[in-house]
């Protein structure tokens, strides 16, 4: 069991500059260069390891609450902090626990029904409420620091602040600023002191950077309260300060992918996935723990354009599937410690068992959530699955659109827009979603809508909807009329994720995948008639899309007619509860299909 060897001594308030000193490691560090002949010549070397996780998304156990069984995928990955804890314990035992740090790159408190339960059902913000399971687990594992992810803001700032209070480590966000003062709303960095055998401590600074897309994706929660400038700009501000404060090593924990791309186009002057650009443009960084993109990067070097220094980046796979190790070798030269070498690798959590310390700590919370998600809320006449949803119009996606459109119609009843046709958008969030025939539980419905999106109604025109559909159709790989169609290779063109392909109900249309992107959508009809460009519609759309997520055209600038603060997932659960019985025959219809030169693909 690792020692509780460090305490966080201070966090910035909303108005503070936030010098976060995360405690001193006071025991002897790594061995000197014995056996290499260097000790005799007075060469002093010290080695230490920084472990990193990211995009944990509320996963403590190797458990899938949506399927109610142990997690598994085609690669037989495992998930959860309990698995990561076993890896961390082994690294600390091998390296010496006082020669290690453990950090995270964000997206911690959203993603599973476990995290949802303690944000909404039995909220941590209630008077005398529980301690968040992720805080309990990460405290028990002795995390040193964690950057803020964009999903930290999904449940609102009060939940995030309560989680922050419950953590015994700082939540870092140098580019999360108070909207009024423009000062850091969270601690920008933490400083850690590692004791060496030579009486010369190593000072390691961890700079936390989060995603500027928060301003779009969680606009309702942060507008007027916080602002999120670019990662490069804030890193350029803080890294020199950290060096001037005596940091021997600077590590960035960035909730931002490495690719230099953005999913929201030019709506903000900042890059969403900017970690590689930070390494390239900002001198003085030794390593970057990358998050947000849900990809695995064991080791990736970027050359800083100004200094020529090689900066190592690593991104461990999401949900606790991997643990990154940054191994540093330092040498004492000219009165200070210098990084001589640094490399990175990842460890696979499927190689170890869960740490019983973590599972025992949270078994009660786990069992409460299992009981909650297995509550029966209705019945279903025929099984529905999402297996073919990315390329066929299937009833399970129709159900989402049917509920959203029904909810918006009721909300606008008696208003000036009540007579307009209601369209609705939905995407396939999981290709394994299933609502069985017979009894329907909360987890069946929740597994269909895994994000904390809320519902809005926007005013759109026929021309705008055509442009919207055309943009969505970029998702498909262009396929010649005579070519064989492989569903496994038909979608995700240019890396477009499933959640950025929208199906629109209330219209009938075809997508000709033989045509190039930008000219695929044909035969768009509304109530049997060709869609008029000047026709007006109420568009039921989730807040992520309405606020610009995915960079779909027109919707972000359209007139807001109505919005709901409750999650769409909860709306769906309540709808099924109220109705009692679900019958796909009442709402399922083939409104869209893929074609090639007018011939249906399927």
Image (tube, rainbow, N blue to C red):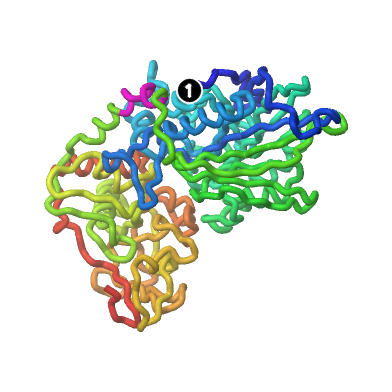
Give the quadrant of residue 506: bottom left
Q: Residue furthest right?
A: 334
Position in image of residue 53 (x %, y %): 52, 38
Secondary structure state at the residue bearing disc 1? helix
Q: Give the camera-side residue of 455 and 254.
A: 254
Q: What's the magenta region?
A: 358-366
The answer to whether 93 is drawn above or below residue 68 in the figure is: above
Image position of 339 (left or right of 384)? right
Image point (49%, 58%), residue name: 551
Image quadrant where residue 325 sits: top right
Q: Residue at x 65, y 33 (%)?
A: 206
Q: Which residue is pictured at 34% across the width and 36% down the height? A: 113
Q: Is residue 137 magenta?
A: no
Magenta-colored stretch includes residue 364: yes
Taking the spot 27% from the left edge, 32% from the top edge, the residue there is 370
- Viewer-closest of 72 and 130: 72
Say if 27 sits above or below 355 in the image.
above
**Residue at the disc numbered 1:** 140
Magenta: predominant secondary structure element? helix
* 559 sits left or right of 433 in the view: right
Along the viewing direction, whichever of 283 and 468 lies nearer the viewer:
283
For disc 1, the neighbor class at 10 Å (few under 14, some 14 to 19, many from 20) is some
């Amino acid at each position: 069991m690792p020692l509780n060897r460090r305490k966080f001594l201070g966090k910035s308030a909303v108005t503070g500059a936030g010098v976060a000193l995360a405690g001193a490691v006071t025991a002897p560090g790594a061995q000197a260069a014995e056996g290499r002949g260097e000790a005799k010549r007075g060469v002093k070397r010290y080695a230490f390891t920084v472990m990193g996780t990211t995009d944990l998304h509320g996963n403590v156990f190797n458990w899938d609450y949506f399927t109610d069984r142990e997690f598994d995928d085609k690669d037989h990955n495992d998930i959860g902090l309990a698995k990561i804890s076993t890896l961390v314990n082994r690294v600390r035992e091998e390296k010496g626990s006082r020669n290690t740090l453990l950090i995270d790159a964000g997206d911690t408190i959203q993603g599973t029904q476990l995290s949802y339960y303690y944000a909404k059902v039995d909220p941590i913000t209630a008077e005398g409420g529980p301690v968040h399971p992720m805080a309990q687990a990460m405290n028990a594992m002795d995390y040193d620091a964690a950057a803020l992810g964009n999903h930290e803001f999904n449940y609102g700032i009060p939940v995030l602040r309560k989680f922050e209070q419950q953590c015994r480590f700082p939540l870092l966000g140098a580019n999360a600023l108070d909207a009024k003062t423009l000062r850091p709303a969270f601690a920008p960095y933490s400083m850690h002191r590692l004791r060496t055998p030579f009486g010369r401590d190593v000072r390691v600074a961890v700079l936390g950077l989060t995603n500027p897309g928060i301003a779009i994706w969680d606009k309702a929660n942060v507008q007027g309260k916080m602002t999120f400038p670019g990662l490069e700009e804030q890193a350029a501000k803080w890294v020199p300060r950290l060096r001037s404060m005596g940091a021997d090593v600077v590590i960035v924990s960035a909730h931002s992918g490495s690719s230099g791309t953005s999913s929201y186009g030019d709506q903000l002057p900042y890059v969403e996935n900017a970690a590689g650009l930070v390494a390239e443009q900002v001198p003085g960084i030794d390593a970057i723990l990358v998050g947000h993109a849900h990809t695995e990067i064991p080791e990736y070097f970027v050359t800083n354009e100004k200094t020529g220094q090689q900066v190592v980046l690593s991104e461990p796979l999401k949900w606790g599937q991997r643990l990154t190790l940054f191994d540093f070798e330092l040498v004492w030269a000219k009165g200070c410690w210098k990084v001589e070498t640094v490399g990175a690798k990842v460890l696979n959590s499927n190689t170890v068992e869960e740490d019983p310390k973590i599972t025992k700590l949270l078994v009660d919370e786990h069992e409460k959530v299992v009981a909650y998600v297995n509550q029966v809320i209705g019945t279903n006449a025929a099984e529905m699955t999402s297996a073919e949803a990315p390329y066929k119009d299937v009833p399970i996606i129709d159900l989402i659109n049917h509920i959203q459109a029904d909810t918006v119609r009721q909300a606008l009843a008696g208003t000036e827009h009540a007579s307009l046709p209601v369209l609705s958008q939905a995407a396939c969030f999981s290709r394994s979603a299933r609502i069985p025939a017979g009894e329907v539980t909360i987890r069946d419905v929740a597994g269909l809508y895994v994000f904390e999106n809320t519902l809005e109604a926007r005013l759109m025109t026929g021309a705008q909807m055509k442009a919207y559909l055309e943009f969505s159709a970029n998702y498909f790989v262009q396929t010649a009329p005579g070519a064989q169609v492989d569903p496994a290779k038909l979608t995700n063109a240019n890396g477009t994720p499933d959640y950025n392909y929208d199906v629109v109900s209330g219209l009938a249309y075809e997508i000709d995948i033989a045509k190039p992107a930008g000219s695929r959508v044909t035969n768009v009809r509304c109530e049997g008639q060709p869609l008029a460009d000047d026709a007006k519609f109420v568009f039921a759309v989730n807040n992520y899309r309405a606020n610009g997520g995915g960079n779909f055209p027109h919707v972000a600038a359209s007139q807001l007619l109505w919005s709901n603060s409750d999650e769409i997932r909860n709306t769906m659960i309540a709808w099924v509860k109220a109705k009692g019985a679900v019958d796909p025959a009442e709402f399922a219809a083939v409104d869209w299909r893929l074609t090639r030169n007018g011939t249906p693909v399927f």
